[in-house]
Every structure is written in C-alpha cells, then in structure tokens.
Image: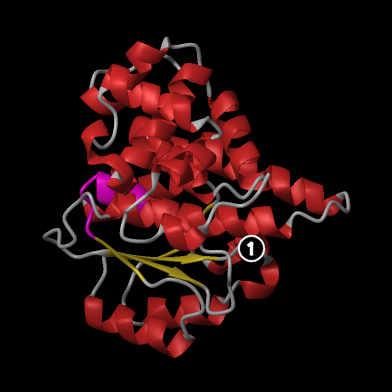
C-alpha cells in the first residue's frame, strides 16, 4: 500500500474528495453516498470545490474503525460525526493489531487517529501499558529476528510522541505548586516512557516539567536548582545511559531524586528510589506532589 502524503496530512486541511476516498480505500461513489445519506463532510452543492477538513477525515477514519468492529454504518456515522457514544468495546489486543497494521503500511493519518482515540478512551497510562508499548516491543522483537522494520518503528515512535503532546495540551500548562521534574539521562534517546508519565501526571493535575531527551547534565542540574521541584525523575533505558553522578549531584542540591527505567537496575544500591513501570512512577510522583 502506498504511504499517505505526509505534507497533505499536516497541511491546512483542504482535502479533495478523491484524495479522501483514496486515503480511506473506498470509491468516490461510496464517499458521495456517505455524504448524501449521513450528512458527512462538505455539502454536495459545493461541486468541484468540495473540500474535507482534517476533522472530517479523522471522523471518517473513526467511522471506518467502528464499522470494522461490527457497528452498522448508520450508527457508526452518528457516533463519529454526531457525538453519540459508541458502544463497541474494543479489546486492547485489537487496538494493538490495528496500530501494528497502520504503522506497517505507513498510514500516518490512521496511526494518529488510532493513537488519539486510544488515549481518549483508555487514558495515557493504560494506552501506554496495554497498547503502545506492546506494539513497540513487537517491532523490537522483529528487529531481533532480522526483520528490517525501521520505517514502521520510526513512524510509530514519532506519532506516539505527537499524540502524547496533543493529549497533554488538553490540560492546563501551569498547575499551582512545585513541579515534578522529568528528565531523560543526558545520553538517553528513548523518551517515550517519560512522555507517557508526563501525560499521565498532566491528566491527574500534578504540576510537571518535562525536559525532553539529550539535555546536557549541566542544564538538568541548573533547572533542578532553579525550579525547586518536589521530585526529579531521571529515566534510563539501558545501563550505559544511567548517570549516577548526575543523580547524586541533583540530590546534593537538596532535591528528592527518583530513578526510572531498567537502565538503573544495577545501581539500586546508590540510595535512590527506583521504579521500573509507569504505575510505580506515577505513584512516586503523586506521593511527593501531595507531601
């Protein structure tokens, strides 16, 4: 299957009917039929200049997913475009398969829609633990078996990061109180677990500051000193990136330090509170925020 046009996907939102039909894998006749029967998209009287918005396209994709999950077309259209509650319960395993297929075929808009729907339905913690992380682990297993799937992994990783950012923007950026400071260790490039933690804390109204990846140790320490956080969480995926000197430096500033991720397993005797799953990281952050 041809990859979607990324520029069009991220453009101003003027989608020609033919482009939408191709994206959805339906005929233009079917698309016109949906528009006539269910009032979906631009009015038929717009003629050659009919254009679908980005929101129209996302809703059409959601409608298709509901139909694929067993909902009649009319009800799926009402759920996607009319705001009616969709009563189709989707197991996490099905969400995993749908996301795997969309990522493998580089259907960026479908990936984004699935991610947003999953976050909105399950929340960031369950979305990460039950859906996103299993898909990423599956891609990692394929790499181990010699299956080159770099494009799919890159597309999915990028879109998950964007989806977490979109989700986090639903909540106030400035929450009163001293923040929990989230930082990847300076050499750590895998930041998605911290982005999942950030979104989960934002949803829980916990003040949070997230630094991103590849931030120099000096900058992390300086921000820790200036922001006066209730807790600094340092993330490491693998032992080579775990920076115990930075953790000790931040502790010497008077900050509580939590170490997160499997990269810290061999350094558990250094006196830092270690967590290795999202639920434990959330509990640690909330514990300090409410102290």
Q: Is residue 273 visible?
A: no
* Residue 137 in the image, given as x and y percentages of width and height: 68, 45
Closer-to-camera residue (182/90): 90
- The N terminus is located in which quarter? top right
List the single residue furthest toward the left.
176
Q: Main secondary structure of the magenta part?
A: helix
Give the residue displayed 39% in from the left and 87% down from the top.
Answer: 219
Residue indicated by mark 1: 263
Closer-to-camera residue (111/19): 19
- Give left or right: position of 133 versus 49: right
Give the residue displayed 32% in from the left and 54% down from the top.
Answer: 13
* Callout 1: SS: helix
Image quarter of residue 31: top left
* Residue 199 in the image, given as x and y percentages of width and height: 34, 51
Give the residue displayed 28% in from the left and 83% down from the top.
Answer: 225
Q: Is residue 200 magenta?
A: yes
List the single residue furthest toward the right.
146
Magenta residues (range): 198-207
């Amino acid at each position: 299957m041809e990859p979607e046009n990324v520029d069009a996907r991220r453009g101003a939102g003027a989608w020609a009917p033919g482009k939408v039909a191709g994206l959805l894998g339906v005929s233009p006749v079917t698309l016109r039929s949906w528009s006539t029967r269910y009032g979906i998209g631009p009015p038929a009287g717009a003629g050659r200049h009919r254009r679908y918005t980005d929101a129209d396209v996302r809703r059409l994709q959601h409608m298709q997913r509901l139909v694929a999950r067993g909902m009649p077309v009319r009800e799926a259209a009402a759920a996607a475009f009319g705001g009616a509650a969709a009563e189709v319960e989707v197991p996490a395993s099905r969400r995993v398969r749908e996301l795997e297929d969309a990522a493998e075929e580089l259907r960026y808009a479908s990936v984004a829609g699935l991610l947003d729907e999953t976050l909105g339905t399950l929340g960031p913690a369950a979305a990460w633990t039950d859906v996103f992380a299993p898909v990423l682990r599956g891609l990692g297993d394929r790499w181990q078996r010699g299956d080159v799937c770099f494009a799919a992994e890159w597309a999915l990783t990028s879109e998950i990061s964007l989806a977490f950012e979109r989700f986090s923007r639903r909540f106030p950026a400035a929450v009163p109180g001293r923040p929990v400071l989230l930082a990847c260790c300076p050499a750590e490039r895998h930041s998605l677990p911290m982005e999942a933690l950030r979104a989960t804390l934002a949803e829980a109204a916990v003040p949070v500051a997230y630094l991103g990846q590849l931030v120099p140790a000096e900058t992390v320490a300086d921000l820790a000193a200036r922001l006066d956080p209730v807790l600094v969480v340092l993330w490491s995926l693998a032992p080579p990136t775990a920076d115990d000197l930075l953790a000790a430096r931040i502790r010497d500033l008077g900050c509580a330090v939590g170490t997160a991720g499997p990269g810290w397993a061999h350094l558990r005797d250094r006196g830092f509170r270690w967590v290795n799953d999202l639920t434990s990281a959330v509990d640690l952050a909330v514990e300090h925020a409410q102290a």
